[in-house]
Image (cartoon, rainbow, N blue to C red):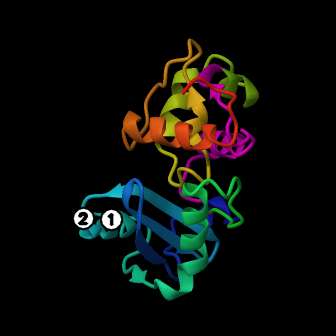
Amino acid sequence: MLKPSERSKPLKRLIYTTFNSPLGKTGVAVTPYGICRIVLSIKKESEFIETLKTIYHSPKKQRCQLTEIEKEFHLYFSGKLKKFTFKVDLTQGTSFQQRVWKKLKAIPFGETRSYQWLATEICQPKAYRAVGNANGKNPTPIIIPCHRVIQKNGGLGGFTGGTHLKKYLLKLEKKSNATFPY
C-alpha cells in the first residue's frame, strides 16, 4: 500500500478493459497494485475513460492482459464464483472510506448487513450515514460487496449504479444462498 505522501503521485500505469455483462457494458481498471475501478453499467466507453483519467492521465485498453479478471466476472454472473481472487487498489480513498471498504469485504456472499452494523464494526456506531456515503464511493463494487449493505428495516437503501442493479446482484447471490429477502 502506498504511503499517504505517495498517494497524490501519478501511478506508473493504468490499464482497463470493457466487456458485456448482464448489467450492460462493464469496465474494469487495474493499477500495478490491483483493481482500482469497476463501473457496472457504462453508457459510453469515453465517459469511463474520462473517469479513469482522474486516477492516471493516459489509461490504456489491454483486453488480453485482463482476460482472467473478465473470466471471473463471467463466473460470478453465472453463479459459479463467490469470491474474486484479484487484489484491489484502494489507495484513492480516504482513511475512513478505506476502513469501511475493508470491512465490506468481510460480508459473506449471499448475506446482507445493515449500515448501522457496518458503522458499529468500524467502531463508529453513530456514523451510519457516513458509512452509507463511503459505501456509495466504493470504486470496486461486487469485489468489495457494497450491494450487500441494506437498511436496518430491511429496505434496499441506495446504490451508485441504481437500486435495480443492487436488487439484481442480491437476487443473483440468492440463487446460491437463500438467506435474505430479495
Measured along the vertical axis of the image, is residue 137 above or below residue 121?
below
Q: Are marks 2 and 1 in contact (CB under 8 Å)?
A: yes
Taking the view exactly as shown, the residue that stands out farthest to the top is 153
Label 1 amino acid?
Answer: Phe
Q: From this viewpoint, is residue 155 visible?
A: yes
Q: From this viewpoint, is residue 7 visible?
A: no
Measured along the vertical axis of the image, is residue 129 above or below residue 7?
above
Which residue does the numbered mark 2 point to in the structure image?
44
Q: Is residue 24 left or right of residue 177?
A: left
Q: Residue at x 37, y 81 (%)?
A: 58
Instruction: Report helix, strand or loop for mark 1.
Output: helix
Q: Residue 167, labelled with which disc?
A: none
What residue span does the magenta drawing correspond to?
Answer: 89-116
Q: CA distance from mark 2 to mark 1?
A: 7 Å
Q: Is residue 98 left or right of residue 63?
A: right
Which residue does the numbered mark 1 point to in the structure image?
48
Q: Viewer-proximal residue, 179 or 137? A: 179
Where is residue 164? Give x, y as percent.
38, 37
Q: Quadrant of the rendered structure where residue 179 is?
A: top right
What is the crowding at mark 2: few (fewer than 14 residues within 10 Å), some, or many (at least 20)? few
Q: Quadrant of the rendered structure where residue 107 is?
A: top right
Measured along the vertical axis of the image, is residue 24 above or below residue 125?
below
Q: Residue at x 52, y 43 (%)?
A: 169
Instruction: Report helix, strand or loop for mark 2.
Output: loop
Q: Residue at x 46, y 40 (%)?
A: 168
Q: Which image quadrant: the N terminus?
A: bottom right
Is 111 contained in the magenta span? yes
Where is residue 19? Give x, y as percent.
41, 70
Q: Which image quadrant: the C terminus?
A: top right
- Which one is in front in this view, the residue at disc 2 or the one at disc 1? 2
